[in-house]
Amino acid sequence: MSNSALITHDSPLITVMRRRTLVLLILVVVIGGGTILLARQRQQTKQPAITPSPTEPAQAAPTPEAAIPAAPTPIPTQPVPFAPVVVARVHLPVGEPLTRELLAVEMRPEDNLAIQAGVTFDNPDALVGSILKTEVAKGQEILKPMLALNPTDLAAFGSDLALYVDQGRVAVAFPIDRFVGAAYALRPGDRVDVLMSLTLLQLDAEFQSTLPNLGQRVDEEALLDGQPFLLEEGQEGRLEPLNLGAVSHVVEVRPGDNQEQIPRRVTQLTLQQVEVLWMGTWFDSLRDAQRLAADGAVVDPAAAPVSPTPTPQRPEERPDVVILSLPAQEALVLKWALEAGLSIHLALRAQGDQTVFVTTSVSLPQMVEQGGLTVPAAGDFGLSPRFDEVPTPGVPALPPGSPQ
């Protein structure tokens, strides 16, 4: 057999091995390509390394301690300056006259707008006597715009006199003369006690008339028989039994009757610590005083108060009225006594006297029993005219030399 005619055939086993080798090579190529692609993607996601510039020195790698940022250095705070400010110690209504007891001093920051504007006060004494034209809450600063400047500034809040009346009290005008008004010595701000004398009479409980009642003889038999029983014509009244079974007809004593009861007088200190607001007629402004003077009233306009002050001056030399400040219940007592015609006098107190007197009513029996008086015995002679017919000694209503 010749060589050219030799044909060699691979075995089936060799063919299978060749195929497996080819598959393995393909897998190696695929896995290697995927690995390279994955490596490139990871390289692109990483931060590029910062290389120092050739002209800049390379910085040292930070140490773990330097990687933690340092805390900022604390800046010391500056203390806020404070300034004294006058404030209201209690709630103050409109028109309240300021006193030292109503004010207090507190420290407020100097950046307060009122302090910067210069409308606050630092001394309470500078406000004593001033009058508020606005309401002030407790703890609120007293500012200059809150104070009244003149009566016109307060015209919308009532009369000037109302500014001097304390809360819970009322002002009452009371007529006086030289005797009742302590010889015109009273001044605004004084304190007085009120003395009253009452003249008492015993009354019949049913008739409410002055005892003794008038009596009239009665015919008892005619009374029992239902016949007219009055022995004499008399007045209407009631029957009262007398001693020994007798009966009397009692009637009311009327003005003009001959029988009279001797009154009994008692005097007592009735009201205490009453404040004098004003002596004479009150004028809210100088304009009112001038108007009254033009109408013929005898006043001194120059002496009339132009603005509310703690101690205004009265415009009259001989005032006929005093204005008192007192609680409402005591005002009723004074009104009743005035309308009942009682004898009333004002007793002047010492300045600053806060004594509360406890007195006993003074009457004739009390003076005799407790005052050591001796009752005079009946005598064989008397005086003419009788002592109760002589007028009580006194002084003229006007002082000597005063203009009529």
Image (cartoon, helix red, strand yellow):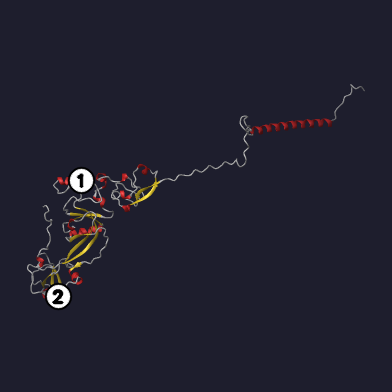
Looking at this view, is 4 or 270 the one in front? 270
Residue 313 in the image, given as x and y percentages of width and height: 21, 50
- Residue at numbered disc 2: 242
Looking at this view, is 361 or 234 the one in front? 361
Indicate left or right for 67 with 205 as reference.
right
Looking at this view, is 43 or 87 the one in front? 87
Residue 368 in the image, given as x and y percentages of width and height: 18, 71
Task: Give the residue drawn at x 22%, y 62%.
Answer: 270
Indicate left or right for 110 with 296 as reference.
right
CA–CA distance between discs 2 and 1?
73 Å
**Amino acid type, label 1:** Leu
Q: Are marks 2 and 1 in contact (CB under 8 Å)?
A: no
Residue 157 in the image, given as x and y percentages of width and height: 27, 47
348, above or below 52, in the image: below
**Residue most toward the right?**
1
**Badge 2 element:** loop
Residue 126 in the image, given as x and y percentages of width and height: 31, 48
**Amino acid type, label 2:** Leu
Task: Tell me the quarter of the image containing the N terminus.
Answer: top right
395, above or below 287, in the image: below
- Residue at numbered disc 1: 286
**Residue most toward the left?**
384
Q: Which label's residue is closer to the chain start, 2 or 1?
A: 2
Indicate left or right for 72 with 354 as reference.
right
